[in-house]
Amino acid sequence: MIISALAFAMLNVGVKYLSAFNVYQIVFFRALGSLCFTFPFLIKRRISFIGNKVKLLMLRSVFGFIAMALFFSALQLLPTGTAISIRYLAPIFAAFFAVFILKEYIRPVQWLYFSLAFVGVVALKGFEFQSFGLGFLMAMASAILTGWVFVIIRQIGNHDHPMVIVNYFMLISCIISGLLGISYWQSPVGFEWLVLLSLGVFGFFGQIYMTKALQGSKTGFVAPLKYIEVVFTMIAGVILFAEQYSFLSLVGIALICASLILNSKY
């Protein structure tokens, strides 16, 4: 899980570094890089590309694409640690949606933890709601859509192989971002090529090691380690991009992470 968190942190840093590029071009390379891993896997294992729950797979992919594009846009506008912390509200939105769609039960103490996360968001942005800029709204919308994606994946269940789900997501993201990004295309120069090509690699291995961690250990033990990504990314942001965080922002990030770690116990 620590390796996964580091891989995702490197992905976030790469997106931040490429802030001069249009988000569609960044999403295109992110998706294309991952397809280089998912296609050979499915071919080698002779697993159908089409899948069984086609409508849900398509819906998950479209929502996932929009969420990813919004998050990458937020990363370009906000300090990296702030953007990631807001995105990590996704499990809370997922739990909320699951109550109504999947008829799941939320324990009373979990609502307390959700409230704690909300306080963290307010602390992160301050109490002046008119100061909520475009970057914050994009990150929040990304978290809401990602929460919806979690519920859709639960609905897909074991009807489709996990790699089929990822492949659908990456293929549709690659097609949509490729078409939308044509008019915004900017030719990379030198090191920019390496960063663009690395996005898919970091994203794929982040997913793989996270999956392996969750499969091989108790969820309550390894899940909280995922939030080390916030720490890794904040350190990189301070060193590479000279980002600054106020004491109140650090308190907000800590409250959000604490809420999610406590929820993982349930």
Image (spheres, rainbow, N blue to C red):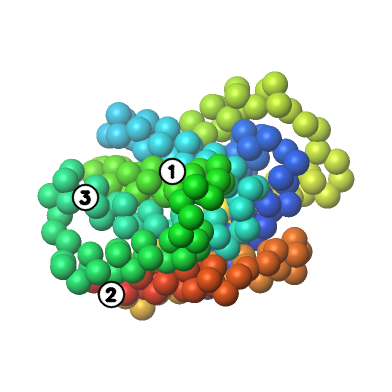
Q: Amino acid at mark 1?
A: Ala
Q: CA gap, disc 2 to disc 3?
A: 18 Å
Q: Residue furthest right?
A: 190
Q: Earlier in the sequence, mark 1 or mark 3?
A: 3
Instruction: Identify which residue, 167 or 48, lies in the foreground.
Output: 167
What is the crowding at mark 3: few (fewer than 14 residues within 10 Å), some, or many (at least 20)? many
Q: Amino acid at mark 2?
A: Lys
**Taking 167 as reference, is 53 left or right?**
left
Q: What is the quadrant of the C terminus in the image?
A: bottom left
Q: Residue 76's spot in the image, x, y percent? A: 65, 47
**Taking 257 as reference, is 96 left or right?**
left
Mark 3 element type? helix
What is the crowding at mark 1: few (fewer than 14 residues within 10 Å), some, or many (at least 20)? many
Name which residue lies at 28% across and 47% down: 151
Q: Which residue is mark 1?
A: 141
Name which residue lies at 39% across and 74% down: 258
The circle drawn on residue 98 is 3
Q: Residue 48's spot in the image, x, y percent? A: 38, 35
Q: Quadrant of residue 7?
A: bottom right
Q: Nearer the viewer, mark 1 or mark 2?
A: 1
Instruction: Identify which residue, 90 or 133, lies in the foreground.
Output: 133
Q: Which residue is mark 2?
A: 265
What is the crowding at mark 2: few (fewer than 14 residues within 10 Å), some, or many (at least 20)? few
Mark 2 element type? loop
Q: Quadrant of residue 261?
A: bottom left
| Location of residue 37 with respect to 173 vertically, above or below | below
The circle drawn on residue 128 is none
Q: Nearer the viewer, mark 1 or mark 3?
A: 1
